[in-house]
Image (cartoon, rainbow, N blue to C red):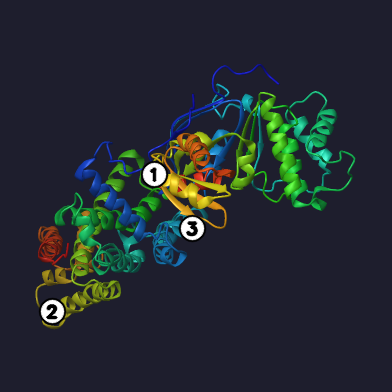
Amino acid sequence: MNAPTVGPTVAAEHVSKWFGDVVALSDVSFEIRPGVTALLGPNGAGKSTLLRILCGLATPSRGSLRVLGSSPRDPKLYRRIGLVPQQEGLLEHLTGLAFVELAAALHGVPSPREAATRAVTKVDLDPADGRGLKAYSKGMRQRIKVAQAIVHEPEMVVLDEPLEGLDPRQRLRMIELFRELGDEGRTVLVSSHVLDEVEKFGSRVMVLAQGRMAAEGDFHSIRELMDDRPHKIRVRSDNPRAVAAALVSDGSVLGVQLGGDDSVIVDTEDAPAFRTAVARVARDEGARLLEVAPLDDDLESVFRYLVGRR
Amino acid sequence: MSDAVIHDRGYRPYDGPRLGQVHAVKSLTLHTLQRIFGLRRQARSKALPFIVVVLAYLPAIVFVGLSALLPKALRDATLPTYEGYYGFVSGAIILFVAFVAPEALCPDRRSRSLSLYLAALLDRTTYLVAKALAIFLTLLTVTVGPVLLLVLGLSIQNAGPDGLGELAIAVGRILAAGTSLSLFFTAVSLALSSLTDRRAVASATTIGVLIGSGIVAAVLEEALKFPDAFLLLSLNTAPYFLVNVIYGVTMGREATYEIPTLIIPLAVAAWTVAGFGFAWLRYQRLQVTR
């Protein structure tokens, strides 16, 4: 890997991209630093357009974007980034190892065979597999695409929907791999709509909606910023009615709803204050708390909120 | 410290430059040109303009090809004069005239989108200016383009005008003749298309008036022995008299008529002004529900 870049890996300032009358990206500014960043957004939000601009496959209609301090169209940059495109673009007659070896050779890697063997092993495929790529399953094809993207040890890896077509075990392995790459100091940008998997990255997210940046940062922190929507918290207790009655009068609570045999659903604007209050209330009422769990702190609910608002 | 941020994606007022009425006219002209040529529309919308353009340019391409193949003596006898070229493309011109103005004007009234234009920077006059400009530019493609192609093609093969001076005069005449033809037919078709919001009716009316006026003029001049100047009542003939004047033609069928030279441009100008004036009046009085 080359020497680490000072400053953000990607810096975008007021980037817009339009195709005729269709605005794909509108005035988007952001920075991406080393580690894993998930790019989220519904279909047509502009994710793929942004990734194409990042990799120099398209130019912004307005605004500027620097990747590792260079223009994305700088040919020298291509050796420092790896791309896993969403589209299938494999040379079907080659074996997996030969395909990755070709990518290594094209990137000017000194020992393409060794590098390819390393990359193929890293994505849990067998370098000795003699089958052509046309015989590969969807999951294997995704993994071989990742292998060709990391074979030259790039500083930045851009992955467009890499979890698509993978079974749950493969997804977990792939997410582990992204984390490993991030921990090595690389910048890993993953676009995905599999939100429950993205949540496992435990990473920074960027949410695009209708071509505009809706939010960016750690999604738990984003949830904290959603102060116009109360947090929903489920409290399970051996005496839910007493806990509910006591919580109603607490200042941190907006609403209380009995949610079953032993649970109370609480709406609160101040989750940290509520967590302190609920322990005190339970102690005062002589009730035992079985569980205090947030119901809408998952990425999916944050995503739905961000994409749905105007 | 958290660096998370939720961006405001709400309504943002436009704070960029505002380009004014001239830009609005230009935009509507370009939009109308796109509509006429069927750009960004399905293939069948492109068919008629494509066919007309092919019909207008094909003879020029054939003549340029022939001039390369034929010996000089035969070539001079075969190739048409520049003004004579209109004889080969007058059918295509009529077809285009009958198609272009209805396509430019009628849908806006039929779909009631005229009020949308008038609610913007455009008023009734500037709206018509934009539409007239689009029709005029479209007609130039069949009144100027093919003859220009012919003269340039022949010149490349040393079969065109002698010397740069002659070439400049020929190009000047082509531009003047084509411009006057386009202006005349723009005015006439604009006036006729302002009468109805149905394209087919406007197209049929335009063809009917162009042919019908010719019949009336011929009857007056030949059967009733009216003066030759009455031929200028024919909307399909009058502009070609002017083309002959521009080319200084003293021979040929048109030149055999006894029409004072000064009367021809005056009559064509009168028709043109009358056409534009009628369309303008019609649009001034048009009821538009805002």
Amino acid type indicated by mark 2: Leu
Q: Which residue matches tag 1?
A: A249
* Res. A29 visible in picture: yes
Amino acid type indicated by mark 3: Leu
Q: Is residue B220 above or below residue A64?
A: below
Label pair 2/3, CB-CB below 8 angstroms: no
Determine the chain carrying the residue at label 3: B
Q: Nearer the viewer, mark 2 or mark 3?
A: 2
Estimate the x, y position of residue A33 in percent, counting from the top left.
57, 26
> Label 2: how many residues lie within 10 Å, few (<14), some (14-19) or many (20+)?
some
> Label 1: how many residues lie within 10 Å, few (<14), some (14-19) or many (20+)?
few
Label pair 2/1, CB-CB below 8 angstroms: no
Task: Give the Cα distance between marks 2 and 3.
Answer: 41 Å
Q: Which residue matches tag 2?
A: B220
Say which mark, if any, is on residue A29.
Answer: none
Task: Give the Cα distance between marks 3 and 1.
Answer: 100 Å
Q: Which residue matches tag 3?
A: B66
Name the residue at 79% across, 33% down: A119
Residue B195 in the figure: left or right of residue B142: left
Name the residue at 26% across, 56% down: B136
Amino acid type indicated by mark 1: Ser
Q: Nearer the viewer, residue A14 or A79?
A: A14
Estimate the x, y position of residue B261 in percent, counting from the top left.
13, 59
**SS category of the residue bearing label 1:** loop
Task: Give the Cα distance between marks 2 and 1.
Answer: 102 Å
Residue A42 in the figure: left or right of residue A86: left
Name the residue at 69% across, 48% down: A88
Quadrant where the C terminus of chain B is found in the figure: bottom left
